[in-house]
Amino acid sequence: MEYGICMLAAVSVREMPSGKSQMVNQLLFGELFLVKAKKEKWFLIETVDDHYEGWVYQIQVKIITEDFFQKANKSASHYLHMLCGQVRLDKNIIPVSRGAQFHLWNDGFFTIEDQQYYYKKAIRPAPDKPTNKDIIEVAKDYLEVPYLWGGRSPFGIDGSGLVQVVFKMNGILLPRDAAQQVNNGEQILFVEAAEPGDLAFFENKEGDINHVGIILGNGKILHAWGKVRIDSIDHQGIFNNEAGRYTHHLRVVKRIVNG
């Protein structure tokens, strides 16, 4: 078994081992993975946090030792909360963006294998006991980010990617896709009883879960549709004032965080 880490701001994870294949996910800086198979210049990887599989171009990721992998995976994670920044390695600069993950971080310094990196601004550990307020605070930082299928960065993100990254930065690991995320948490019977930070899931005409958003309270929801936006929600679903119609049909509301 080989182990790896993402050392770029964002790396495309593709459905097939080809640059022309659809992007189904993104790795962000500092995220760990397992290498399941190789094909020419591509790795089939499985992400550690959510066990999501896909193909990455070999030269865009870094292979690490099992010893460092285990240490990093067990360490308390710190996350970048500003839009973007610069990690320093000697005289080299690596751009990073919101959601970047830092392992074994100590007062601005962190080591990957035998190399010492530096970054200090806007780094926060995931809270031990996240609150709904924490969830909403991080979620609102993504407002106006453009929609991107498979995206998880502040330069392009999809609905379930938004939910996953926001909760991850608060110490809660959720699966990658909305159809998987819906299996988590406590069901809330009526949307009127939902609290800020609850997740609302939506279905298509076939009854499949295909969208998710974060309840803000007062009949509002934050979600990624065209861009990360705030729309109205009621028992029918999401009503978009600009379109003048319901854009998503509500299936269920789930509570992940209490308090």
Image: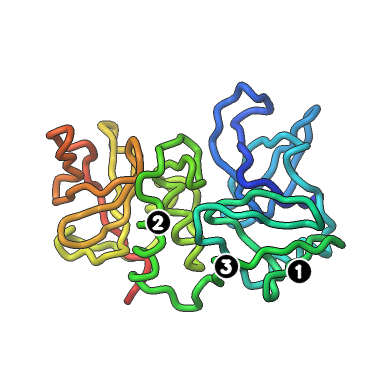
Q: Which residue is mark 1?
A: 71
**Three-letter residue code for mark 3:** Ile
**Three-letter residue code for mark 1:** Lys
- Pick the front one: 221 or 48: 221
Q: For the residues carrying marks 1 and 3, which lies nearer the camera in this image? A: 3
- Residue 239: percent from the left, percent from the top? 16, 42
Tag 1, which secondary structure? helix
- Pick the front one: 228 or 234: 228
Which residue ends up furthest to the front in the rendered image?
91
Q: Earlier in the sequence, mark 1 or mark 3?
A: 1
Q: Which mark is residue 141?
A: 2
Q: CA distance from mark 1 to mark 3?
A: 20 Å
- Residue at 60 percent across and 68 percent down: it is 78
- Residue 66: percent from the left, percent from the top? 82, 60
Q: Earlier in the sequence, mark 2 or mark 3?
A: 3
Q: Which residue is mark 3?
A: 123
**Three-letter residue code for mark 2:** Asp
- Residue at 43 percent across and 73 percent down: it is 130
